[in-house]
Amino acid sequence: MFDDSIFTVGRPSEAILDMIQEGLDHINAYLTDLAARSGQPPQQIIDRFLKKHTRLNPTNDWNSYSKYFTQHTEQELVCLWKTGEFAGSIDSTPSATVCKKCYELFKKRYPDTWQGILAKFEESVQYTEMGKTFGHWQQLFNRSVKQFTQLFAALLKAHSIEAAFVMAGGIVNQDASLGYVYTTPGAEDFFMQRCRADDNAIIGHFKAHIYNQLSLTCVTEVLHTNKSDIKGKGKGKETDRGQDVVDLTSDYDGPVPDNGSDEREDHNLVKKLLSALVESHGQTWADGKLFPWKQLPQKLGQHALICVNWPNAVLFPGQECLSHTKPKGISDLTIPECLQVIAVLRDSGPHKLHFKLDPNSKSDLLASKRPVIIGAPPLHDSESLKVKRIFYNGKVDYEGLAWLLN
């Protein structure tokens, strides 16, 4: 790009440094203006410039491949062995020469995408850093902080987006020192003014929240794991509080325990809205304190009701959540799933979640010839080509309407 003979060697003078600084100021001003007009982050524009106008590679592909080779040694050696250039044992430790041959073969195997493969591999490493030492976690945390701060700084320059965020480690006995607060200039003193907390205090509050959630999750898992033992030993007996020991995951049996449920306010709102749909058809079987979530397909069939447009990305009534050893009914719904159900229940468009009364089809519903729950049409980019359906007998198929057009 440049002729090396025109460059001078040695320490630059003050005049040269001033000239360079003035030029850099012009570049920075133009880069900021270009980012604002193009809508692209400044770093992305710089990367594009480096790839197009310099002879330097901003990333060291050999180092990236070395990491890739370490994790895929057997695969790479097999490919090299097929070419006849490697006669050693695949289980042996490869030399630097063998690694270099694998690198050249890797570039030939993927002539157009090999750099992209290595780039994606580098990104994936950040999500597989399990079992590392505290030093590794500290480096990963600092690297993540740097990436986020650069991202928000770019958004501020390009779109005048102000931001504030808090980051902290989530391992109680290890990540005590991992915490960071960032605010853009327009959001300075946000936590002090709105939360009455400085940076150290807000990190402390955030860590307390994280650790509390982790503790509650652990307690919940332990209680549900040991629940069968508790039921076997205490069923039919009185506890110290004077209540029967019952299955907290059941939708029907036993008294309602105090503070023993995993339900949140969003769960209660979903139950309230679904019960209102049932009542709108003159039926009262969903009015009780315990909503029949697990038996909803059977209840719908028995009362000639059909649920239409259930969100595809949400756990269907009557189905078990795979992340739990024992289903917990409506409490299995996550917060995003509850929000989706609430949104489609309150929707006024053609894909609104609703119940349809069809007495003439009751026999077909009970015989599982017609579905009792019909999912919403999948989006054009969904993996499912047709609508998911659930029948009275619990059978599931994907033979409904086709997906929505783009």
Image (cartoon, rainbow, N blue to C red):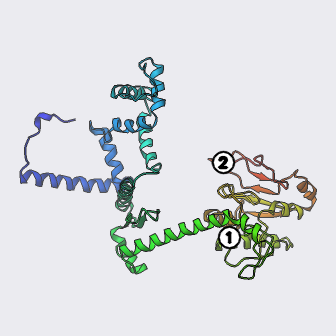
Identity of the residue furthest to the top in this view = 84
Can the viewer see residue 403? yes
Residue 347 in sight here: no
- Pointer 1 local density, CA inside 10 Å: few below 14, some 14–19, many at least 20: many
Please tell me which residue lies in front, 52 or 365.
365
The type of residue carrying mark 1 is: His
Crowding near pointer 2: few (<14 within 10 Å), some, many (20+)? few
Mark toward the viewer: 1 or 2:
1
Q: Is residue 298 left or right of residue 50?
A: right
Q: Earlier in the sequence, mark 1 or mark 2?
A: 1
Q: Is residue 200 above or below residue 63?
A: below
Circle 1 residue: 267
Q: Is residue 392 above or below residue 47?
A: below
Asked if 395 appears above or below 331 in the picture, the reply is above
User: Residue at image x 66%, y 58%?
Assistant: 324
What's the residue at 71%, 52% (across, down)? Answer: 377
| Disc 2 target residue | 405
Q: Which residue is at the far front?
A: 233
Judging depth in this view, the residue of 385 and 117 nearest the camera is: 117
**Three-letter code for the amino acid on which mark 2 is drawn:** Leu
User: At which x and y percent is residue 383?
Assistant: 65, 45
